[in-house]
Image (cartoon, rainbow, N blue to C red):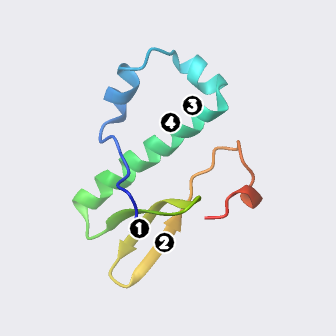
Amino acid sequence: MSIPKWQVQNSALFSALTLRTFAEVQADPIAWGQWIEMAIGVHLLRVTHLSSIELFYWREGNDEVDFVIMREDSVIGLDVKSGLFSAKNAPG
């Protein structure tokens, strides 16, 4: 079982409370990757409220998948990458 993943439900509130400008966040590859993952998570979370899709997170040791989307008998693992890491560095 994975630990719970903290996911904001409104990206506007998240960005309004940051002390950094958009340009500063975009210039920082780690922060930018976190913002991209957050934006995708917000969208997926909204979809779960409007459909029969369930959203999960998976982590085992150092391996993780950012989002696990389940609908009926279908399961999709979605690992978000913003260009900072190549696919070979994503063992999850």
Identify residue for label 2. 76
Question: Which quarter of the figure has residue 70?
Answer: bottom left
Q: Answer yes or no: do the residues labelled 2 and 4 have beta carbons within 8 Å?
A: no
Against 91, residue 46 (above or below) is: above
Q: CA distance from mark 1 to mark 3?
A: 24 Å
Which disc number belongs to residue 18? none
Please state which amino acid type lies under the numbered disc 2.
Ile
The residue positioned 66% from the left and 23% from the top of the image is 27
Task: Give x and y (percent) for residue 13.
Answer: 31, 27
Identify residue for label 3. 31
Give whichever of discs 2 and 4 has the lower sequence position. 4
Q: Is residue 20 left or right of residue 86?
A: left
Helix, strand or loop under label 3 = helix
Crowding around mark 3 (Cα neighbors within 10 Å: few <14, some 14 to 19, many 20+) is few
Q: Quadrant of the C terminus?
A: bottom right
Q: CA distance from mark 2 to mark 3?
A: 25 Å
Helix, strand or loop under label 4 = helix
Helix, strand or loop under label 2 = strand
Identify residue for label 4. 35
Q: Answer yes or no: do the residues labelled 3 and 4 have beta carbons within 8 Å?
A: yes
Please state which amino acid type lies under the numbered disc 3.
Ala
Please state which amino acid type lies under the numbered disc 1.
Ile
Give whichever of discs 4 and 1 has the lower sequence position. 4
Identify residue for label 1. 69
Q: Answer yes or no: do the residues labelled 2 and 1 have beta carbons within 8 Å?
A: yes
Of tags 1 and 3, which is closer to the observer? 3
Q: CA distance from mark 2 to mark 1?
A: 5 Å
Crowding around mark 2 (Cα neighbors within 10 Å: few <14, some 14 to 19, many 20+) is few
